[in-house]
Image: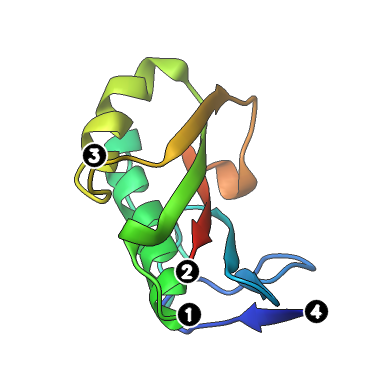
Amino acid sequence: MKSEIKTSQAPQALGPYSQGTRGSGEWLFVSGQTPLDPETMVLVGVDAAAQAHQCLKNVMAILAASGAGPEHVTRTTVYLKDMDDFAAVNAVYATYFPAPYPARACVQVCRLPKDALVEIDAIALV
């Protein structure tokens, strides 16, 4: 059985998916977060670092709505429009997660929703 995680502190879903779900056990899954402002639903930031910051703020809001925090995150995926932004996004990412850091994949994609430069999803063990 799963339950939906929903908060007004993160952007509402752009399609048929939940901001996050929690399984009947201890796993929490946060859908990919783009750099949308939760109030205006407008992209925040013009560069990858600023957009990564907003993506991670959105991820943290969904975690908090479930009673979790960054220390519970075990795995993330970072989607970049341009792999040249890897270092800039890493610098922002490192400020959100304590060591030991979550396992992570980072991939370049050809396009993201609303033409964002970054999207980040997460899995947490609560």
Q: Which residue is mark 2?
A: 126
Query: Please, what is the three-letter code of the amino acid marked with disc 3?
Result: Ala
Q: Quadrant of residue 61?
A: bottom left
Query: Please, what is the three-letter code of the amino acid marked with disc 4?
Result: Met
Q: Which mark sits nearer the N-terminus, 3 or 4? A: 4
Q: What is the x, y in percent for residue 55?
A: 41, 53
Vertical placement of 27 versus 123: above or below? below
Q: Quadrant of residue 79?
A: top right
Q: Secondary structure at mark 1?
A: loop
Q: Quadrant of residue 109?
A: top right
Question: Residues at badges 1 and 2 in contact (C-beta under 8 Å)?
Answer: yes
Q: CA distance from mark 2 to mark 4?
A: 16 Å
Judge left or right: residue 62 versus residue 27: left
Mark 2 or mark 3, whichever is nearer to me: 2
As drawn, the label of residue 1 is 4
Q: CA distance from mark 2 to mark 3?
A: 21 Å
Query: Please, what is the three-letter code of the amino acid marked with disc 1?
Result: Ser
Q: Quadrant of the N terminus?
A: bottom right
Q: Which mark sits nearer the N-terminus, 1 or 3? A: 1
The colour scheme used here is rainbow
Q: Which mark sits nearer the N-terminus, 1 or 2? A: 1
Q: Residue at x 36, y 22 (%)?
A: 86
Q: What is the x, y in percent for residue 93?
A: 29, 41
Q: Residue at x 28, y 41 (%)?
A: 100
Q: Which residue is mark 3?
A: 94
Closer to the camera in the image, 44 or 103:
103
Q: Which residue is mark 1?
A: 66
* Tag count: 4
Q: Which mark sits nearer the N-terminus, 2 or 3? A: 3
